[in-house]
Amino acid sequence: MAGLLSALRTPRGIVTVFLLLVLAVLPLLTQAFDQRYLLSVSTRIVIWSIAAVSLNVILGYGGLVSFGHAAFLGIGGYAVGILSAEGFESGWLQWPVAILVAVVWATLIGALSLRTRGVYFIMITLAFAQLVYYLSSGLAAYGGDDGLNISRSRFPGLIDLRDKAAFYWLCFVLLCGTLWFCSRLVHSRFGYVLRGAKSNELRMTALGFPVFRYRLVAFALAGAFGALAGILLANDGAYISPAMMSWVKSGDLIVIVVLGGIGALFGPLYGAVAFFVVEEFLPPLLDLLHRGWGEYWQIVFGPLLVMIALYARGGIDSLLGRRRD
Amino acid sequence: MDYLLIQVLNGVQLGLLMFLLAAGLTLTFGIMDLVNLAHGSLYMMGAYFAWTLIGWTNSFVLGALLALPACFLLGVIVEIVVARRLYARDHLDQVLATFGLILFFNELVRAIWGPEGRSIAVPAFLNRTVNILPGVPYPAYRFALIVVGTIVAILLAWLVARTRVGMLIRAGASNRRMIAALGVNIELLFSLVFGLGAVFAGLAGLMAAPIASVKIGMGDDILIVAFVIIVIGGIGSIKGAFVAAMVVGQIDIVGRAFLPDFLKTFMGAASASAAAPAISQVLIYIVMAAVLVWRPTGLFGQRT
Amino acid sequence: MHAAESIHFWVVAVTEPLLQADALVKRFGGLLATDNVAINVMAGEIHALIGPNGAGKTTLVGQLTGNLRPDSGTIRFAGRDVTRLPIHARVQLGLARSFQITSVLREFTTLDNAALAVQAHDGHSFRFLADARCDGRLRDLALRNLETVGLGPRAHTLASALSHGEQRQLEIAMALAGAPKLLLLDEPMAGMGADESRRLVALLRGLKERCGMLLIEHDMDAVFALADRITVLVYGRAIASGTPDQIRSNAEVRQAYLGEGVL
């Protein structure tokens, strides 16, 4: 309670607490005002926040520009989808399997990718994601390019994922859990090693840290949480398709993380909210200026990204005042 | 045997197209240290410019020739407005900004040319076959692509290896400060290199148009393959880009041409023809991973 | 029998140098950067390595730390052959180094830097939840190391805000974290004012009891004030090795340094 009160003393604390409170009671609001669409947008915001938080672990804290993060979402989603298509509908089976597969894959490609640096790392992560993408589009038995309608994971007696509000709350609770984990991770011994290696890899090695191993574990962790987001995404639409892991989605995730404030704990949340708010509200806004312009909102959004990259590196988080660390 | 020869030629033709795209990318990477995701957009713009200009002039050759300076101009504008501000920034900034450019260009094309795809017809004088060997016909347009691609590749090799500009380009890749000390206008050099890359990308786009089609986002997926090529070849190396493009071209075509039959031996015909293109794409990435495991800076990359 | 063996073992333990490099050779293309060099450091000794620029000092140190792999030759440290061990494994054995170019973690506080160094020697760091800032094991020892080098009052300053001399002090505090057996100091005085240098000389002399040191340094006042033995490296070859007095009077050394006027 004391922590909450002290958090409310900074603009960042006020914004974050307010945002989390609104997200916590959102289904009640959307029910009261009969805004079912808003609930579905919010569900997506929460799920993409989880994905962005997981990317922030390697991108923000580890300083590793992974350009293939959407693949982990895809792996999570396809694990659920394939198991469900084969008749294994229990979430207790599907979810752990999905996360396990993602962790194994992340460890494998991490072990190869983390040998490279800089641009090579960006490109090799992208290429591995493309590999998964093409593999999934080659799975004719599971819909190929078109994707596949699936039935949602079952947790009998616990929760019915077809209930939109219940599903939303599940996502929200998982987001809170992910954020909590990250808040602990940053200042843990592991987090210090990860951030130290971002600051000065050579120095950390000279201190005696086998940096590669720590980065690999961070990569696998990020993959696990990415898969969680993918699991939720598949259950949200009861649908999987290669599109959920196209490289543009990986780009979107980077945009969300940078937009929110790279390496900031709640940055991915701000970023996801901002991203979807822009996507939903920029078109009608443009339409107000001139009928028909709204359709071309990305003509405005694209240059906006350029401006952010050039002039606003700290993202939304930096607008909320200096970070205390 | 004839079938094999034709497929190999198709691979060469694809490889040359990919080389044109990858050459500009590897130059901007190697010299300006810029990750330019928007390079694929220049490929797309080349095709759309050509579509419009061919419509105006009623001539494929004239339209194509006019599209090239348009691409150059566009490249220079992009360089001055956005790219040059990114050279000194870290890769994440570059990825973000040029990702923004992709969104911008895709939407711009939709606003100007509309959402539906366009097509450019094969010019009449090339709409026939030539006998590459007695009794082995090959589409003349594809053959022309090989000829043009080869000429441009040789030109580029000559430019980089033999001319003063090329010397500066090679020096720039290894020592940017030295060029500035030589009194060369480095800003102008970078604008020219970027514009040149745009011309190659646009040329690849317009030459591919009659075979594929002109559509929004046409440069996005092929861009990733171009990245794979320069990573395999070693960033900054024109020679590496050429070798890697040839390898990738062969893998892709061979995969598409021969995998379905191979796969049919142990799966259904329908699944085989669905899986084959995917697997041939996957093969490219596996080759890249293997090269990077073997040499983390590519085949001809500078070892750090 | 047993007694004899253990006496024999004891004799070996005191006479074997802490660090013993033999017949090291390292080539870069046509350049012979390390030419059949042997060097050793005893426990509790400061051994200085000097030589003109380009003599191959950094290359030699690189092989000792594990950044470079020698083409031939062996390196023994604390009774083990470490020639093929990676950097971090050598650090774990007690071989710590400071850098020629100051390289602290600039985005972290002084205390964070020192604590990370302690953490490196406190088992693995796969601990994901406990707050390392509240970890007494790390913080107490880190603070003590900072106080040893005189940085106690600056514990909560960002490392990037420290002066050059202070950053070098921090480097040494970090090197001390693992209770190293041997410190490799690569030009610790570089870029320091006379005052700062004097303080560092006093600090290093005080640390001699704790660990042996291999000191690479251009500041000859510091070298002759500190070193028990000196080895002179020229064109990749060790041309002389001995006490400061022996080195001072060595004709070949004087030749090599002729014109530099430092001796």
Image (cartoon, coloured by chain):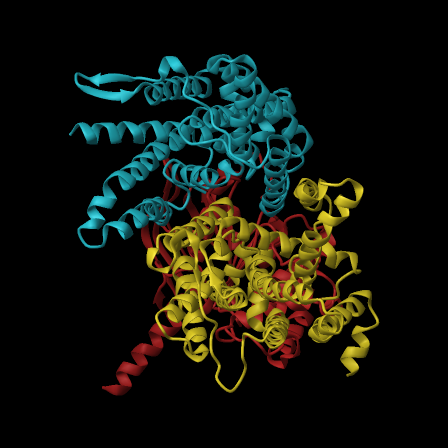
Chain colours: A yellow, B cyan, C red
> Which residue is located at x 25 percent, y 31 percent?
B7
- Image location of residue B159, percent across then percent down: 46, 18
Place residue C15 in its image quadrant.
Answer: bottom left
- Image location of residue B109, percent across then percent down: 60, 33
- Image location of residue C122, percent across then percent down: 52, 75
Front-lying residue, A274 or B55: B55
The answer to whether B115 is drawn above or below residue A98 in the figure is above
Viewer can see residue C253 = yes
In the image: residue A323, left or right of residue C182: right
> Which residue is located at x 56 percent, y 29 percent?
B45
Place residue B297 in its image quadrant.
Answer: top left
The answer to whether C242 is drawn above or below residue B153 in the figure is below
- The number of callouts visible is 0
Furthest toward the right, the residue is A9
Front-lying residue, B168 or C87: B168
In the image: residue C262, left or right of residue C192: left
In the image: residue C139, left or right of residue A65: right
